[in-house]
Amino acid sequence: MLHTDRPTTRHGLNTIPAMGLALTLVTPPALAADPVTEALSNGETNLDARYRYEFVDQDGFEKDAGASTLRTRLGYRTGEISGFTGFLEAEHVTRLGGETYNSTINGVQNRPKVIDPEVAEINQAWVRYEGLVDTRMTYGRQRFFLDNHRFIGTVGWRQNEQTFDGLTVVNESLPDTTLTAGYLYNANRIFSDASPNGNAPMDTGVLNARYDGLGAGSLTAYTYLLSYENAPGRSTRSHGLRFSGETETGEELDALYTLEYAHQSDYDDNNADFDVDYYRVEGGVRAAGVTAKVGQELLGSDGGNVAFETPLATLHAMNGWTDQFLSTPDQGLEDTYASLATTVSGVSLKAIHHRFDSDEGSAEFGSETGFVASWSPDETYTLGAKAALYSADNNDPNPDRTDTDKAWLWVDASF
């Protein structure tokens, strides 16, 4: 009798009717996916774009600067394989419109600087291992910052951000404790690879220990050993202690505070002999949706000849948005500031005022007032506007610091 049943599949067996006989074919089980192929296919892609227009009116230049730039970043992170993941991110900055600003590499000298050069670079390229308990090890080119970016930061305000080549290890095995250690052998600076200042080869050691088990705030101890291959005179050793937190002092009233002290001296092949101090003292309150702060930061000087430096910092976030103090004056820098911040109808608002003076001597460097507003209608987009007005003092010994007004408009999209 001819079987007319349909083929059935059970446990890898196919039964096929043919010429009155049931022929059984054995099919091999599906091959296991290759782990590397699976990790690559299960990865995640990220895309970030930021358009910004920056305007600069600075005394001493015959023309203003206007920089219209678009930065895009495209990244891909693999899936995990045996505790390993990888990440690759390309960054591209292009100028939209005329070349009406000094990017430091475009040859424009009659306009103020806006350090957003056109560039196409690999922003990040790293391998990470998380196979050890509570430990993350990352090797390669990476985004890396610590605390408030004062000593090591990303300079994320600029279109071409700062990243580092090296090995970093973060461990959270101890209760309420984060230990970060690293060896950095190059800083990929904001000036781009096309600039002689675009890379800073180094042998830098980093150790940062933060304890969050105190009810009043976080206590951090750190050591940073900066050794520059091509600029030994900038090699320094810094040790510091930082305490920052907030306490609820009443109904809808919080007290805010930061205390930080650090000591810096010459290191490695630096032939200078100096000892300088740093401190930040900040206090504030938050009530009814308004945050008010006052503080003072000192980058000290040793006899007016050498001052406390933090060359790997996000300096734009520190001593004024007009970037008058991207390096510390030899006389040191005392920054006394006050700020107000709130949110109105979903728009974040902040105003800040700085007064700049020297540590050594009685030089008065000037003052700056800044305003910023930003709005994020959802998790994808952010729109912002910002302005800063710097007024130089006639007592300033540096003639390059002149009255400067800056303004920015931007839109950021992340996918």
Image: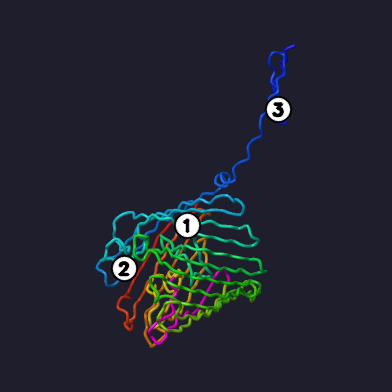
Mark 2 or 3: the one toward you: 3
User: Toward the viewer: 291 or 239?
Assistant: 239
Q: Could you give the CA–CA distance between mark 1 and mark 3, rounded to whole angstroms? A: 50 Å
- Classify mark 3: helix, strand or loop: strand
Q: Which residues are magenta?
A: 287-311
Q: What colouring does the structure picture have?
A: rainbow
Q: Could you give the CA–CA distance between mark 2 and mark 3, rounded to whole angstroms? A: 80 Å
Which is more N-terminal, label 3 or label 2? 3
Task: Please determine whether, in this image, residue 52 is positioned above or below residue 308.
Answer: above
Q: Label 3, on which residue?
A: 13
Question: What is the crowding at mark 1: few (fewer than 14 residues within 10 Å), some, or many (at least 20)?
Answer: some
Question: What is the crowding at mark 3: few (fewer than 14 residues within 10 Å), some, or many (at least 20)?
Answer: some
Q: Label 1, on which residue?
A: 124
Q: Which residue: 70% across, 18% down?
A: 17
- Classify mark 1: helix, strand or loop: strand
Q: Does 289 lie within the magenta span?
A: yes
Residue 325 location, quadrant: bottom left
Residue 57: mark in rendering: 2
Number of numbered discs: 3
The percent position of residue 53, horizontal first and vertical second, equals 37, 59
Task: Please determine whether, in this image, residue 329 is positioned above or below residue 376.
Answer: below
The percent position of residue 157, horizontal first and vertical second, equals 43, 64
Main secondary structure found in the magenta portion: strand
User: Badges 1 and 2: C-beta atoms under 8 Å apart?
Assistant: no
The percent position of residue 195, horizontal first and vertical second, equals 34, 63
Residue flagged by tag 3: what amino acid is it?
Leu
